[in-house]
Every structure is written in C-alpha cells, then in structure tokens.
Amino acid sequence: MFVNEFARRAGEQPHVVRYYARVGLLNPARHPRNGYKVFTESDVKRLRLIRNMKRLGYTLAEVATVLENAERGKSPCPATRGVVERRARAGKRSLRQLQAHMEHAVRQWRQAPGGVPDGDSVRCLIETVEAELGRDCGIDP
C-alpha cells in the first residue's frame, strides 16, 4: 500500500503517516522502481498501536521508547507501566483541580442575586476548564 491507501485503511491522515515515517515510528519499505514508501498490514497494526498509545497520553518520544524496546526483544512493560503510572497521577491531580474549580464556581454562584450565575460567569467557567483549570478570568479555586 502507498501512503494514501495506507492512511485511509488505518483511519489516519496522510500527513500524519508521512510524519511518523519521517521521525522513525513507521518504517515502510521502498518500492524498488520508484522509491515510494510501501506499507504492509503489519504497519497498519503498528499505526493503530501508536494511535492507541497517544490516546492514553503517551508522548511520541515515549511511544518510540516502547517500540524500540519491543523491537530489541526487551519487554516494553516497565516503560509502559511507568508512563501509565505517571499519567494516572497527573490525571488524578487534574481531576482534583477541576473538582475544586467547579466547587468554587458553585459557591460563587450561590452568592449571586437569586443564586443564579450570570452568562459571564458560566462562560468563564467553561473557558477556564478548557484552558488549564481556572487560570483565566481571575477564578482561583
């Protein structure tokens, strides 16, 4: 398969496939006559693995480390476990911060006339949750 067909089959954008090949996460063969990158079914599985690791919060550097360990016959489990443990701790911190931020907003809203938040405070909560848990709009949990 060439890049476009491979990307379509794997459910990814062609520019992402080209980038992953350029940085060494994918290692396609070269067509002998024209030098085009040629991907196989095992490359599809590898790309799906990369995408799943990214969804779990792995950086591309961490993905590369896990894949390199596996290719060398070393168990990727310790590296994988370490990444997952770090991500779990960071996720817990983020969720605690988000919870504190929302509770603070609710306390502020209770003090509003009639206990009803105005449009600006609702917008601000939504924007701050999206942008680093309350560092904008002057709201601190």
Image: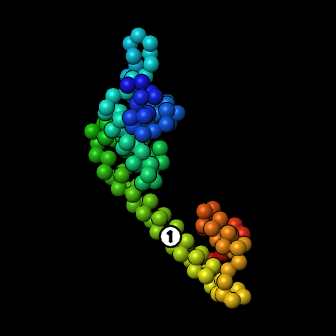
Could you tell me residue 131's position as x and y percent?
63, 62
Residue holding disc 1:
95
Where is 129 relative to 19, above or below?
below
Could you tell me residue 138's position as x and y percent?
72, 72
Question: Can I make out residue 82 in this image?
Answer: yes
Where is 88 relative to 32, above or below?
below
Taking 72 as reference, is 121 left or right?
A: right
Residue 137 in which image quadrant: bottom right
Q: Residue at x 29, y 42 (%)?
A: 74
Q: How is the image coloured?
A: rainbow
Taking 8 as reference, is 102 left or right?
A: right
Q: Residue at x 69, y 89 (%)?
A: 114
Q: Residue at x 40, y 30 (%)?
A: 6
Could you tell me residue 32's position as x and y percent?
38, 12
Which quadrant of the rendered structure holds the C terminus? bottom right
Residue 27 in which image quadrant: top left
Viewer-closest of 79 and 100: 100
Where is 59 relative to 131, above or below?
above
Viewer-closest of 42 and 59: 42
Amino acid at dot 1: Leu
Q: Count residues near mark 1 (Cα–Cα under 10 Å), then give few for <14, some for 14-19, many for 20+.
A: few
Question: Can I make out residue 19 in this image?
Answer: no
Could you tell me residue 119's position as x and y percent?
70, 73
Callout count? 1
| Name of the residue lying farthest toward the top | 33
Q: Residue at x 28, y 46 (%)?
A: 75
Secondary structure beneath dot 1 equals: helix
Viewer-closest of 49 and 89: 49
Which quadrant of the rendered structure holds the N terminus? top left
Where is 97 relative to 58, above or below?
below
